[in-house]
Image (tube, rainbow, N blue to C red):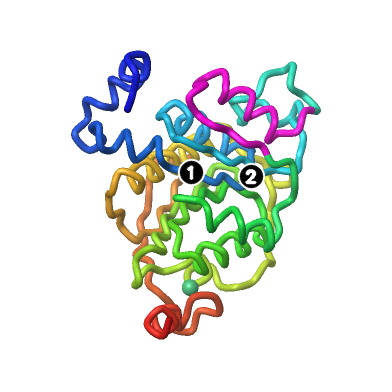
């Protein structure tokens, strides 16, 4: 299935037992949806393109600005004012022409998510606002798709995998509630570049793991960039969750 050039390109990860040829085939057959093309998505998308994911779909309605470049490491100075989705798409295609990358320059809404999440193997939430996070989560619950969530602000990062293929998995709203208040964006609060890098890189690793068949722990992981320490919290399904409660019953009735 892979030609000689591809076998060489992926040789160092093919050596890893957890990937192997079967895992590489799973990666090349996969479609990963990345919502948001900022500081989390930049490293995540670079690693996923490098790893040979078959299809990447990138969505963002914003343009590259000078103040993004300290953390959005895929972008180059010459890309300022380009739409982020297109600028990231260009870099990924240069990195690995095997990967089919599609840039969607738009703010995601429920109808768009309905289509794209349905067709995705794994979804990465790299967005920067609660309304988008809730909409992405709702679509992932609806279609039973694994959601890899990341967030970062100042010196703090958050990371969680909601493997909604599993019936007992918690969803984003089980952990954070169903509200959309309390947005605090990087452009108001600030962010140290490597903190988003740490979280975005972990999002790529989790996506690869999920695609090669790993079962990941249901944990909310909090990173403190001051002490370089992680704290782990167990996530549980909320029986009163406004988004996913009754999911198991609905599946049984279906
Ligand atoms: Zn829930």
On screen, residue 217 versus residue 143, left or right, reads: left
Q: Residues within 10 Å of mark 2 (few under 14, many from 20)?
A: many
**Which residue occupies the extreme front position in the image?**
1
Q: Nearer the viewer, residue 138 or 233?
A: 138
Mark 2: which secondary structure? loop
Q: Is mark 2 within 8 Å of ligand 1?
A: no
| Residue at (50% x, 44% y) in the render | 32
Q: Quadrant of residue 203?
A: top left
Whether residue 38 is situated above or below residue 112 in the rendered picture: above
On screen, residue 52 versus residue 151, left or right, reads: left
Q: Nearer the viewer, residue 185 or 141?
A: 141
Of label 2 and label 1, which has the lower sequence position? 1
Where does residue 166 sit, x and y in percent of width and height?
A: 34, 66
Whether residue 39 is situated above or below residue 133 in the rendered picture: above
Quadrant where the N terminus is found in the figure: top left
Q: Which residue is mark 2?
A: 36
Cα distance, mark 2 to mark 1? 16 Å
Q: Which residue is mark 1?
A: 31
Residue depth check, mark 2 versus mark 1: number of the one nearer the observer = 1
On screen, residue 113 versus residue 120, left or right, reads: right
Provide the residue span drawn in magenta: 82-103
Where does residue 23 sit, x and y in percent of width and height?
A: 28, 38
Mark 1: which secondary structure? strand
| Residue at (38% x, 63% y) in the render | 165
Q: Is residue 132 magenta?
A: no
Where does residue 7 sit, x and y in percent of width and height?
A: 31, 19
| Residue at (57% x, 23% y) in the render | 93
On screen, residue 72 versus residue 96, left or right, reads: right
Q: Nearer the viewer, residue 181 or 119?
A: 119
Where does residue 125 sit, x and y in percent of width and height?
A: 55, 51
């Amino acid at each position: 299935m892979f030609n000689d050039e591809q076998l060489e390109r992926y040789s160092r990860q093919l050596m890893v037992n957890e990937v192997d040829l079967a895992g590489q085939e799973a990666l090349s057959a996969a479609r990963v949806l990345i919502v948001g093309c900022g500081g989390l998505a930049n490293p995540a998308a670079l690693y996923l393109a490098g790893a040979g994911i078959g299809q990447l779909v990138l969505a963002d309605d914003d343009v590259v600005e000078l103040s993004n470049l300290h953390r959005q490491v895929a972008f180059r100075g010459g890309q300022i004012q380009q739409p982020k989705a297109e600028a990231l798409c260009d870099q990924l295609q240069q990195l690995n022409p095997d990967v089919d990358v599609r840039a969607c320059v738009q703010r995601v809404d429920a109808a768009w998510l309905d289509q794209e999440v349905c067709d995705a193997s794994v979804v990465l939430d790299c967005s920067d606002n609660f309304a988008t996070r809730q909409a992405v989560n709702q679509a992932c619950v609806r279609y039973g798709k694994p959601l890899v969530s990341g967030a970062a602000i100042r010196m703090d990062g958050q990371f969680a995998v909601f493997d909604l293929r599993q019936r007992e998995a918690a969803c984003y709203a089980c952990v954070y509630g169903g509200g959309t208040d309390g947005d605090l964006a990087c452009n108001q609060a600030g962010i140290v570049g490597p903190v988003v890098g740490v979280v975005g890189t972990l999002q790529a690793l989790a996506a690869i793991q999920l695609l090669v068949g790993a079962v990941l722990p249901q944990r909310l992981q909090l990173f403190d960039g001051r002490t370089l320490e992680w704290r782990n919290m167990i996530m549980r399904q909320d029986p009163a969750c406004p988004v996913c409660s009754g999911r198991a019953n609905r599946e049984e009735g279906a």
